[in-house]
Image (cartoon, grey):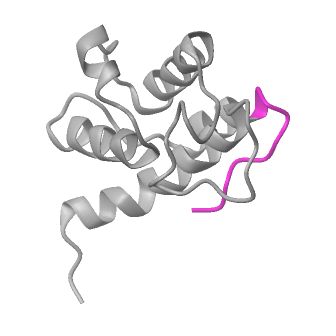
Amino acid sequence: MTHTPAAVGAEVVAPLVTNLVSLIAPRKVDQVEPEHRLVGDLGFHSLVLAELGYNLEELFGLETLGPEEAMKLERVGDVIRLIITEVGEGRGTYPDADTVSSIFARFGVDSPAL
C-alpha cells in the first residue's frame, strides 16, 4: 500500500492537533474529533484561539495566520487540513520529537504517541 503525502501528513498532523486542542479547550470532551467546532463544541474564545494558534505555529514552524485565514478555521478538521496544506506547500515543517515533547511539556503531559 502506498501512502500519498496528504495521507502521511494526516497521520502525523491529526493526532498532534487533536491532542493539543484537547489540552487547550475550555470545554472538555472524551475525545476531540475533526468534526468538533472549536467555538461551539469546545468552548474556544479569542484568547484561547490565540493560544492554540501560537502553539501550532511553533509546533509546525508556521508563519502567523492572518485574521481572515484564522476566521475560516471553524472545526478541528479545518485546522488539520490547513496545517497539512501549509507543510505540503513548504510553509511549515513536521516537528521533531524534541519539539513535540517541549510543546506538550508546557501542559504537564507527555507527548502523544505517533
Displayed quadrant of residue 89: top left
| Residue drawn where x is 24% and y is 90% of the image | 1
Marker count (numbered): 0
Q: Is residue 110 magenta?
A: yes
Q: Residue furthest right?
A: 108
| Residue drawn where x is 56% and y is 49% of the image | 18
Magenta segment boundaries in residue numbering:
105-114
Note whether residue 66 is visible: no
57 versus 34 height, above or below: above
Q: Is residue 109 left or right of residue 37?
A: right
Q: Residue furthest left?
A: 89
| Residue drawn where x is 58% and y is 45% of the image | 97
Q: Is residue 62 magenta?
A: no
Is residue 71 or residue 89 the one in the foreground? 71
Residue 56 is situated, as x and y percent measured from the top left of the image, at: 48, 28
71 versus 39 height, above or below: above
Q: Residue furthest bottom?
A: 1
Q: Residue furthest front?
A: 40
Residue 19 is situated, as x and y percent measured from the top left of the image, at: 63, 48
Note whether residue 43 is visible: yes
Q: Quadrant of the C terminus?
A: bottom right
Is residue 74 or residue 100 the one in the foreground? 74
Residue 75 is situated, as x and y percent measured from the top left of the image, at: 42, 42
Is residue 36 or residue 69 the one in the foreground? 36
| Residue drawn where x is 69% and y is 31% of the image | 24
Tell me the chief SS of the magenta region.
Answer: loop
47 versus 96 height, above or below: above
Residue 48 is situated, as x and y percent measured from the top left of the image, at: 62, 18
